[in-house]
Amino acid sequence: MIPRYQRPAMAALWSDDAKWRRWLDVEIAVVQAWADEGVVPQEDAELVAANADFVTADIDRYQAVVHHDTHAFLQSVADSLGPESRWVHHGLTTNDVWDTASALQIRDAASLLEEGLARLETVLAGQADRYRHAVCVGRTHGVHAEPTTFGLKLASWVDEVRRNQARLAEAKAQVAVGKISGAVGTHATVPPQIEEGVCRRLGLGVEAVSTQVVQRDRHAHFVSVLALIAASLERFATEIRHLQRTEVREVQEPFVEGQAGSSAMPHKRNPEKCERVCGLARTIRANAMTALENVALWHERDISHSSAERILIPDACQALDYILDLFTWVMESLVVDEARMRANLEGSFGLVYSQRVLLALTEAGMGREEAFRRVQEHALASWDTETAFRGRLAGDEAIASALDAEALDGLFDPSAFLKHVDASFARLGL
């Protein structure tokens, strides 16, 4: 991931140094497990735990010769030890270390994402409650439909974020498993109790039956969940983008002092932060496709997945971490124009109350088909001529005989659409 879209904690987690550090954690845990079994002398295990280390520059130098990152890593670790270095990597194959260490990185990355989701939920819940009764027009197909509230719109986002929190927790649990079972997973060179001891030390679950790798459906599930979270953020950001259009202008992204919206047009105030969220969400979805394609490997394993995973998992985690933080900031400082929302609601000549008129006519005894035809006829004429819908209805003798002026006035009240808003909030505990 390019630095522009990195945040420090997540970027540090996916650095080469952090990767090698977790590899070393795995190797030390394996030596300690062998010592528990009486295979490795306790004194040697203690020396390895106390002194084993690596030098990233040396790993790079060795790798230029051996063209194998595990060999290069082990050479650097051996440089930090004495004769006890013979126990490092005892009975293991590369993926015992790689997959188990990767599980540690992914678990820690998921924890950071969980923190980001929790913060977003808090911000959205606060804004939803603040604008719980802020009346605005609801739109379907981009066209005025019926009144709603801006808070109710945001409340649906809170619920979606909560679902994503549950999905991430499940995916984190499924991917946080280790594998210390040797070549092709038979435990021929490293018995199951070693694997169980190592994973217990590292706080990981155990892949019950592995091949030479942890099965990649786990990673595909995890990255797919990241893509789904990104899709939710894109949905939210797209709504903000639409509502910031000049013709709508109901909300606006925060615009900080000194910010420029265009290099050419000084007046521009663009929803560029939300556009950035949408763009990066697309890259995360693309990574999910690659993760799904990595599930099918040849026989007990090949390494067609390896090169792709070195890019897609860190990038997906970092991109999601970035847009989670960015969109949370947008929502925290969002500029909301309630007066403009009311003006837009009233800008379609009262047409948003057409269903209430239809229902009132049928309840007054008019046949539904006739009622629909009459209401639609006046609604379309009102739109075409830009005249008040309420006035056209009053001039229709059949409608006027069914609904007197007071009854008709009562149908053009947006508060009628809001009587159950609090019930929806109560369902969310808000």
Image (spheres, helix red, strand yellow):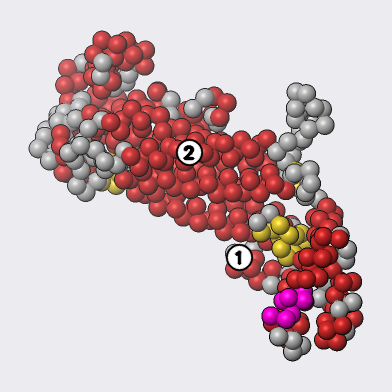
160 up-or-down from 395: above or below: above
Indicate the amino acid at tag 1: Gly
Which residue does the image show at 86% across and 61% down from the upper left? 385
Badge number at residue 314? none
Q: Please state if 47 lies on the left or on the right of 226 as rendered.
A: left
* Residue, disc 2: 284
Q: Where is residue 425 in the image (x, y as percent from the top left)?
A: 65, 66
Which residue does the image show at 86% across and 87% down from the upper left? 401
Is any part of residue 342 visible from this angle? no
Q: Which residue lies furthest to the left in this view?
A: 188
Is any part of residue 152 visible from this angle? yes
Q: In terms of secondary structure, what is the magenta stretch mainly?
A: helix
Mark closer to the chain start, 2 or 1: 2
Distance (Cα) linking label 2 and label 1: 31 Å
**Is 374 covered by the magenta stretch?**
yes
Q: Please state if 358 lies on the left or on the right of 83 as rendered.
A: right
Q: Quadrant of residue 103?
A: top left
Q: Give the range drawn in magenta.
A: 369-375
* Residue, disc 1: 429
Q: How crowded is mark 1: few (under 14 residues within 10 Å), some or many (20 or more)?
A: few
* Foreground pick, 181 / 145: 145
Q: Position of residue 98 (x, y in %)?
A: 29, 31
Q: Please state if 146 lies on the left or on the right of 210 as rendered.
A: right
Indicate the amino acid at tag 2: Ile
Q: In which quarter of the image is residue 312?
A: top left
- Residue at disc 2, secondary structure: helix
